[in-house]
Amino acid sequence: MTSTDWTPERFDRIADFWAERLVLESAALDVYGELAEKPLGPEQLATRLKLDPRAALLFLDALAGLGLLTKMGRRYTNSPAAERYLVPSSPDYLGHRLISARNDWQLWSQLAESLRTGERQRDARIFRDDPEAARPLLLSLHRNARSRATDILDRGLIDLSKRRRLLDLGGGAGTYSVVFCRAHPQLQVTLVDRPIAAALARDVVTSAGLEERITVLDTDVDERELPSIYDFIWISNVIHSRSFNANRALFERLYRRTQAGGEIAVHDIIMEEDRTQPASGAVFSVHMLLSNGVGRCYTYHDVHTWLTGAGFRDVRWVRDESDYSIVTGRR
Ligand SMILES: C[S@@+](CC[C@H](N)C(=O)[O-])C[C@H]1O[C@@H](n2cnc3c(N)ncnc32)[C@H](O)[C@@H]1O
C-alpha cells in the first residue's frame, strides 16, 4: 500500500469496485468448485448454487467477461486462472482470502456507524465465537505466513538455534510452529490458542507429521496460566487485537512464564511514532475499531513500555523491508 501515488486513475480504481465484489461473491458461492469436474449450463449452475435463473445468467456472463469463466456456447467452464486459484482442491487455492475479504466487506459497510459511535460492528469475537468467519481468515493467514516464517529464519531476524522449548502464543493454524520446528530439530513447541484455531492447528501439525514435537493446547491465555518452561515465546499477530492495558497485563504474565536467559519476540505491524506508517497498519487499526473495538496497531514505544515494564531487558526493534517487524526482549 503506497501513500504517494494519488492519481485520478487510483481514485477511479477505488470507485470501480463492482468487479471486485462479483469475484468475492463467486468465491463464497464456490462457482469454480462446481465447475471443477465438467462444463455446466446456466440452469444447472443456478440450481446447484441456489440462484435465481436470470440473475445467474447475468452473474456468470460477468465472470466470463472478467476472464474467470470461459463461455462455450451456452455452457461455462473455469478459465486457467480460476482452475489454479479458485478451485478448492488446487494447491494454489486462495479462495479463503477472498471469502474472508467478503466477510470483511459486510463489516466495512458499517464504517460510518463505527466512526460516529466509536463502537465495534461485529457481535461475535471472530476467533472465539464465529468459526464460519474465523476458519477462512486463519487459513488465509496460514497461506501468507508460510513464506514470512521462512523469511524470518533465512534473514536471521530471530535465532532459534539454541532454543529448546518455544511457546507459540495465539499460534492460529500453526504455520510458525511448523516452519520453526522443521528448521530446528532440537525444538519442542507448545502452540496455545482458542478451540477454533486449535482444531485447525491440530490438522496442520498432523499433516506435517509433527505431533511428537508440537503440542496444541486449547487455552485462552487470559483465563488459564501456562507452565514456566519456555526459553522462547513467539507472539505473532496477537497484540493488535487487544487493548493497551490488556497487552501490558499479558506481558507481565509472560515474563513469569519465560525461563532465565529466555527470549520473547513480538511480531506484528509495528507503527512509527506518529502512527501513520506503515499505512497498512494505520488502515488495519480502523479494521480493529470495526472488528473488536479495542485493538489497534501499536508503536515500538508501546511495545517497549510493556516489555520493560514486565521486566524484559535488551529490548530491540528488528526490522526488514516488510510492513511487519519484530520486537525482542530477554529475561
Ligand atoms: C490473527 S491470528 C494470528 C495467527 C498466527 N499467530 C499468525 O501470525 O499467523 C490471532 C490468533 O491469536 C489467538 N488469540 C488471541 N487472543 C488469545 C488468547 N487470549 N488466548 C489464546 N489465543 C488467543 C486467536 O484465537 C487467533 O488464532
Image (cartoon, grey):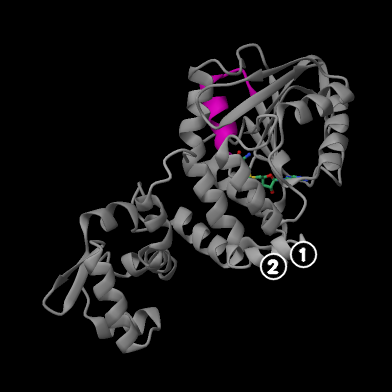
Residue sitting at 34 percent across and 57 percent down? 86
Alpha-carbon distance for marks 1 and 2? 6 Å
Q: Which residues are magenta?
A: 174-187
Q: On the image, numbered disc 1 is attached to which residue?
A: 117
Quadrant including the C terminus = top right
Q: Secondary structure at mark 2?
A: helix
1 and 2 marks in contact (CB < 8 Å): yes
Asked if residue 134 lies left or right of residue 307, the reply is left
Residue sitting at 54 percent across and 15 percent down? 156
Q: On the image, numbered disc 2 is attached to which residue?
A: 113
Q: Quadrant of ligand 1?
A: top right
Asked if residue 14 lies left or right of residue 241, the reply is left
Q: Quadrant of residue 122?
A: bottom right
Q: Residues within 10 Å of mark 2 (few under 14, many from 20)?
A: some
Decide which of 72, 191 is in the foreground and name it: 72
Decide which of 163, 185 is in the foreground and name it: 163
Residue sitting at 52 percent across and 50 percent down? 139
Decide which of 142, 106 is in the foreground and name it: 106
- The amino acid pointed to by label 2 is Glu
Decide which of 88, 321 is in the foreground and name it: 321
- The amino acid pointed to by label 1 is Thr
